[in-house]
Amino acid sequence: MLDQHGYVDNAHDHLVDERDTLRQRIAQHLDEADVVILSGGVSMGKADWVPGVLAELGVDVIFHKVSQRPGKPLWFGKGPREQVVFALPGNPVSTLVCCRHYVIPALASASARLPRLPEFASLAAEIVFEPELTCFQPVRLISNAAGQVLAMPVKTNTSGDFTALSATDGFVELAREESHFPAGSPVFLHRWYAS
């Protein structure tokens, strides 16, 4: 996703869920980079070491957890040299949603790119979402004879269902204050990649 949005000066490192290894490698990345993006280890499980390791390394938490689904465990902070640290949830759907919704716009702002204009679509089918959370619903885009862009909801089987995303073009943002979104409702559209 970073490459496809034009952020090609990046490196990838796969780390095991072992506290000492995480501490050593994250410290190295903090020394080498202005922006560190982590995925996984930020929830409440026994092996979710990332928030504690970041605190030990002098990274101050700005916020941890966002009232949304998927992606609630999102963590954000700043390092001792003002490095920006995003710690995204580890489930693939959550990771992609948080990267597209938070990381990509932050990088665009930091690199003085013009902000993208808001994009809207009409829901092609009704969505009912009960929890009082902002819902980011993956969608496939279609159009009708009137030239409208329609967002067809694509069901995922939990936030670990990466394969379901292969048939999607992005996600729509559904306000947390509502629970019923009839077909035809205008919604914010976030494409995975710039068109």
Image: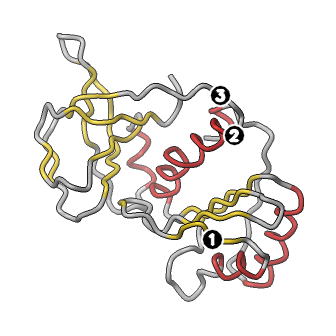
- Separation (CA) of disc 1 from disc 3: 26 Å
Q: What residue do we see at 27% from left, 50% from top?
A: 155
Q: Is residue 3 above or below residue 146?
A: below
Mark 3 lies on residue: 113
* Residue identified by numbered label 2: 110
Which residue is drawn at the image coordinates 41% and 29% (left, top)? 118
- Amino acid identity at mark 1: Val
Query: To which residue does mark 1 refer?
Result: 61
> First in sequence: mark 1 or mark 3?
1
Q: Earlier in the sequence, mark 2 or mark 1?
A: 1
Task: Report the front residue among 88 and 79.
Answer: 79
- Colour mapping used in the image: secondary structure
Q: Position of residue 189 (x, y in %)?
A: 36, 34
- Residue at (68% x, 57% y) in the render: 37
In the figure, is residue 11 to the left or right of 158?
right
User: In the drawing, does residue 24 fall left or right of residue 62?
Assistant: right
The disc label shown at residue 139, or none: none
Distance from disc 2 to disc 1, alpha carbons, whole Å, reads 19 Å
| Kind of residue at badge 2 | Ala
Establish if 11 lies above or below 188: below
Residue 72 image point, x, y percent: 43, 65
CA neighbours of label 2 inside 10 A, class few (<14), some (14 to 19), many (20+): few
